[in-house]
Every structure is written in structure tokens, then in C-alpha cells.
Image (tube, rainbow, N blue to C red):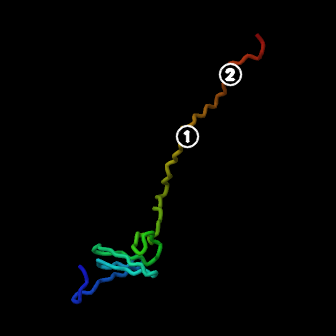
Amino acid sequence: MPSSPDRPARVTLGAEGPLLVEGPVEVVGDDGTLYTSRRFTAAICTCRRTRTYPWCDTSHRRRVKPERAAGDEPEKKTDEPEKKTDKTKTMDNKTDGAA
């Protein structure tokens, strides 16, 4: 809902996230550039890691790999076909020069 004299704009502060501002929103950048969002709620980046400044793209989230359970081994993948190991030696059909 847009702000009005009866109802001011609501800004929500997150502990590790963006500022959430009820829209539509106009943001003036530090260089004077005017950014506009017509969305119901705009997420404004506060960490400056975003690629879409001033809008948040969740770059602030920590990327953590899930832990594996004990005994879980990652599946080994290779591009090469599985090699067969034959422990028996074979002789080529070569003659040693004696006929």
C-alpha cells in the first residue's frame, strides 16, 4: 500500500539482509542516480554485494555446502570408460625370426 499522510511508508530492517520498503519506491543513489521500483515491496541492498545495485539479489547469503552424513561417500564420476584390469599376460603372435 503506498504511503500517505495517514499511513507512512513502512521500512523493515533485517539482521543480515536488505531493507524491505513498501513500494512503489524511488531510491536516490550516492551519485545522484534515481532508481524506481513499482513492486509491492522493494528489497534495498545494504551489503553492496549485489550485482543489481541498489536492489538486493540475495548475494549477502552465505553459501554453505550441506554436511554429509557419516559414511556417505561422494559418487565418483569420470568421463573415461571403466578400465578392465587383466592380470594375465598375453603373448603377441610374433615370430622370432625362425621359420
From the image, tell me which residue sits under label 1.
Answer: 80
Q: Amino acid under label 2?
A: Asp
Q: What is the residue that sits farthest to the top in this orientation?
A: 99
Q: What is the residue that sits farthest to the right in this orientation?
A: 98
Q: What is the residue that sits farthest to the left in this orientation?
A: 6
* Residue at image location 34% in from the left, 78% down from the top: 20
Rendered-image quadrant of the N terminus: bottom left
User: What kind of element bears circle 1?
Assistant: loop
Does residue 97 appear left or right of residue 9 in this picture? Answer: right
Q: Amino acid under label 1?
A: Glu
| Nearer to me, 89 or 44 | 44
| Nearer to me, 70 or 83 | 83
> Where in the figure is residue 21, as x and y percent of width and height?
32, 79
- Sequence-wise, the earlier of marks 1 and 2 is 1
User: What kind of element bears circle 2?
Assistant: loop
> Where in the figure is residue 74, as x and y percent of width and height?
50, 52
From the image, tell me which residue sits under label 2.
Answer: 92
